[in-house]
Structure formats: structure tokens, C-alpha cells
Amino acid sequence: MTRGEWRNLGVGLAFISPWIIGFLAFTLYPALASIYYSFCDYDVFSRPVWIGLLNYRDMFTDKVFWKSLYNTMYYAVFSLPLGLVISLLIAVMLNQQIQARPLFRTIYFLPSLVPVVASAMIWLWILNGKYGILNYLLGLVGLQGPDWLADELWTKPSLILMSVWGVGGSMVIYLAALQDVPRELYESALIDGASAWHKFVHVTIPMISPVIYFNLIMGIIGALQVFAQPYIMFGGGGPNRSALFYAVYLYQNAFDYYEMGFASAMAWVLFIIIFFLTWVATRTTRRHIYYAGE
């Protein structure tokens, strides 16, 4: 490199140095430190003591750990596909030439703008077993609504139902992708006699497949890290810990029980799970994703 190139490099690094310092101090160092702490007995207030794999052995013999992992997987298995399908259907509907289309788009997107704490408080009222509006509406059609928040059989379904309410972000991404689908493809399919369903399956889905893949990956990451809603609505985990999610139990170990080493081990196990599921999703869907530039 010439002297001028070295000078330009120095100027560029100086401009991005605030980000570099922030990354090193608040991302890289905590990540590396958590790896070390996961092999230690560490309570934040005293020096960490190296204990090897004891945290990991204790984790896999901890019934509460397996309960929280089961609750999280149950939530992810149902909320993720439900959110993907519903947000896509709403986006397809709002992509049609209908009256007051901007108004409907705003209405469907608005719940995703509500702060998490506020939305959790709203759903505490909606899902109240005695005075909630949802059970009131079910009663109008002759159905006996369950005690959503106090019955362990309904705590996870209530959170899954709540997750569907906030699909506005995915919907907007789908909507942007739908508007980029070439119109001539629909016209060619129409000339060939394709029905609306065939156009959706053979034109729309392949053309927006990269966006579906993106929402799938983000959904996996988000579903396995869900924290605020179950923590606010159920605190310690609800009846019989039926709403104790993985991230909530990790938080409890770190900041309630001061088992920071155990919590760090849990965090890295969660990272491995997310990495594995993301890899599986990538491997199984890559043949079905169409990129126009390829």
C-alpha cells in the first residue's frame, strides 16, 4: 500500500472507531467472557471459580431446565408456522386492489408498533378468565371460555394467540416482496388458464421464496428467545411453570439466583440450538428458494 492508501485507511478507521470500540466492549468481550463464565461458579459479586463442565452437567439433570426448553419448543412449533402463514395471507389480501387499502394496511401494522409491555398489559385484560373481553365474546356465541392465564393447559396457547397479533412486521416485508413480483408472470399464467390458487402456488410463492426464508430464520431466532411477554404476564412461570420459557429461566438464574455461570452455560446451549435449527432450515429450503439474479 502507498502512503496515501495508508492515510485513507487511517481516516476510515478513525471514522468507524466509535463502532469498533462499541463492538469490542459491548459485544465481543461479553460474548468471550460468557464462554469462560460458563465453566465457572460465578455469582457476579466474587471472583469466578473454575469448575469445568459442572454447569453443563447440572443443566442436563435440571428438571426445570427441560421444562423451560419444552415450553419454548412448544411455543416455537406452533407460533412460528402460524405467524408465517397468517402474515402472508394478510399481505396477499392487502396487495389486492381494494377500497381504503392504505387504511387497512395501517390497521394491521399498528399492533407491531405497540410497546411490548403495553401489549402484554392489554392481553392480560383480554385473556382474563372472569372479566376478559375474549371470554365475553365467546360467551355471546354460547361457548365457555377457559381460564387462559390460570389454567396450565391454556397458558402457552394464550401466548401463541398473542404472537399472532403482532405479525405486522412480517406482513410489511411480505407486502414489499409481493409488489416486486413481475406482473407479466401473472398475465402469462392467466393466458395459460391458471386459476388464482395456481398463480399463488406457482408464481407468487416461488418469487417471494427468499423473503419467506428470511422470515423463517428470523422467526426461529425470535421464537426461541421470547422473553418479555411471558415474563410480564406470568412472572415466575405461571401455574406449574407451564409458561416458564427458556429465556425467562436464564434471566432468573442470572439476576434472581445470581448463578451467572449457569446462566452463561444456558445461553451457549441456546446459541447451539438456534444455530442448529437455522442450519437445518437453510439446508432443507435452499433447493426451493428462487433468486432472480442466479
Image: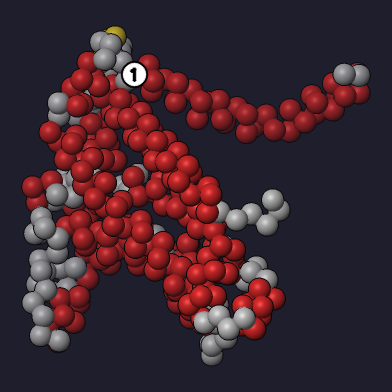
Q: Amino acid at mark 1?
A: Tyr
Is 274 positioned to the left or the right of 13 in the image?
A: left
**Residue 179 image-quadrant placement:** bottom right
Q: Residue sitting at 8 percent across and 47 percent down?
A: 240
In the displayed structure, would residue 253 be above or below residue 85?
A: above
Q: Is residue 85 visible?
A: yes
- Which residue is painted at 42% across and 36% down in the image? 275
| Element under disc 1 | helix
Taking the spot 60% from the left edge, 56% from the top edge, the residue there is: 290
Residue position for label 1: 37
- Residue 183 visible, this orientation: no
Q: Quadrant of residue 263?
A: top left
Tell me: 17 left or right of 8: left
The residue located at (45%, 21%) in the rendering is: 32
Q: Nearer the viewer, residue 248 or 205?
A: 205
Q: Of 42 and 55, which appears nearest the observer?
A: 55
Residue 181 location (% of width, % of height): 64, 69
Q: Position of residue 94 (x, y in %)?
A: 51, 78
Q: How many residues crowd around disc 1 within 10 Å: few (fewer than 14), some, or many (20 or more)?
A: many
Q: Is residue 17 above or below residue 95?
A: above
**Rendering coords of residue 268 (x, y %):** 36, 28
Figure colour scheme: secondary structure
Where 288 sits versus 127, above or below? Answer: above
